[in-house]
Amino acid sequence: MLLKNNTFTLKWIEDREFFDNTSRNKFIYEKLIILNKKKSMLDLGCGTGSFLRWCLSNKVFFKNVHLIDHDKALTKHIYNILKKKLNNSYKIIGNKYLNKFKLIYKDQESINILIKNNNILDYIDKLDNFDVVSFSAVSDLLSKSITRKILSNLNSEKVILFTLCFNGKIQWHPTNIHDKYISKIFIKDMQTDKGFGPALGCNFKKYLTQLIEKKYYKIESADSTWRIKSSDLRSTNFQKSFLQIVYSVMKNRNDINIDILESWYHSRLKSIQNKSSKLIVGHDDFIIKK
Ligand SMILES: C[S@@+](CC[C@H](N)C(=O)[O-])C[C@H]1O[C@@H](n2cnc3c(N)ncnc32)[C@H](O)[C@@H]1O
């Protein structure tokens, strides 16, 4: 999943889109729809543009959308994925090689899209230029200082969204005596530097709540947990990918008991293969206003 230089594999980002879409809490789009100022949206760490597609599928339209990610290997697919996934109600106008094009919905809504390969850090002082700023499945990578900076740029004209924020809950069924041991080390690994200083990982929610209380901002939150059964091939494959990620991360650490890891991994894999496995990964969505 997370490769060197804090980049993600295209396969992981593509595979998770389905499960993210089923888990994203509808209160986010309900709030966005009634928001009267939503001319511009900045999506930081946009990947392949999954959050924008979710907005469009729920009839949340912005006039201008800036999609920012440092990884060209992901953003270069945005145009084609939009083309493939959007239905006939949309027209795409423009040249994909310019990273600048327009979507027209039913000749009524026109959305200008600009894709840039930049670091999130380059935008922290530019949040003022946007009505909605989105961080989707990015919160666990952020550090305390960058989260503080993001919030200090909040003004009354703007909303900040942190969606699909991992909250530390990893639950496998059937349970295994080593689940807790493995999760604890996996969660510890998530708190290493991911390009912004020591990452908050699953402590993001706690830290965000403390900051909001100090600043008297308004925060609303709702659940966006992945609940993955073994009912179809897509679900079992996704569980396998998640298991593989945990295994690879653990294998590269020097504080893990390798025998425990191997026994846990093979027992989990067996449960997935015989379709008795279920996986729950806890997430929350947040919307913040001044
Ligand atoms: C888990 S993915 C989420 C992608 C997308 N937001 C989504 O919901 O599918 C995290 C994304 O953050 C991007 N990212 C991580 N660190 C970054 C940085 N410092 N600057 C820009 N993008 C970054 C990664 O390339 C990746 O696309």
Image (cartoon, grey):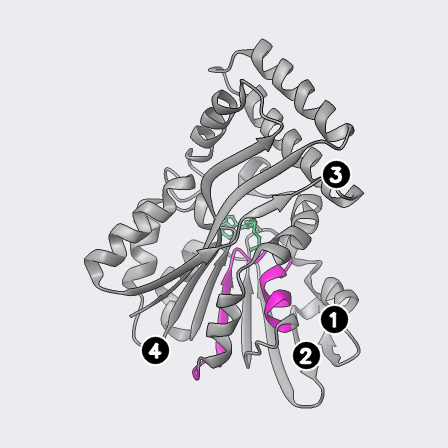
Please identify, in this view, whether the residue under mark 3 or under mark 1 is nearer the observer. 3
Q: Amino acid at mark 1?
A: Leu
Q: Which residue is mark 3?
A: 237
The numbered mark, 3 or 4, whose residue comes first in the sequence reads: 4
Residue range in magenta is: 36-56
User: Percent position (x, y) of residue 208?
Assistant: 32, 52
Number of marks in picture: 4
Q: Tell me, for residue 86, which label it has, or none.
A: 1
- Residue type at numbered disc 2: Leu
Which quadrant is home to the N terminus?
A: top right
Queried whether the magenta region covers residue 140, the answer comes back as no
Q: Amino acid at mark 4?
A: Glu
- Circles 2 and 1 in contact, beta carbons < 8 Å: yes
Cα gap from disc 2 to disc 1, whole angstroms: 10 Å
SS at badge 4: loop
Question: Which residue is nearer to you in this view: 113 or 170?
Answer: 170
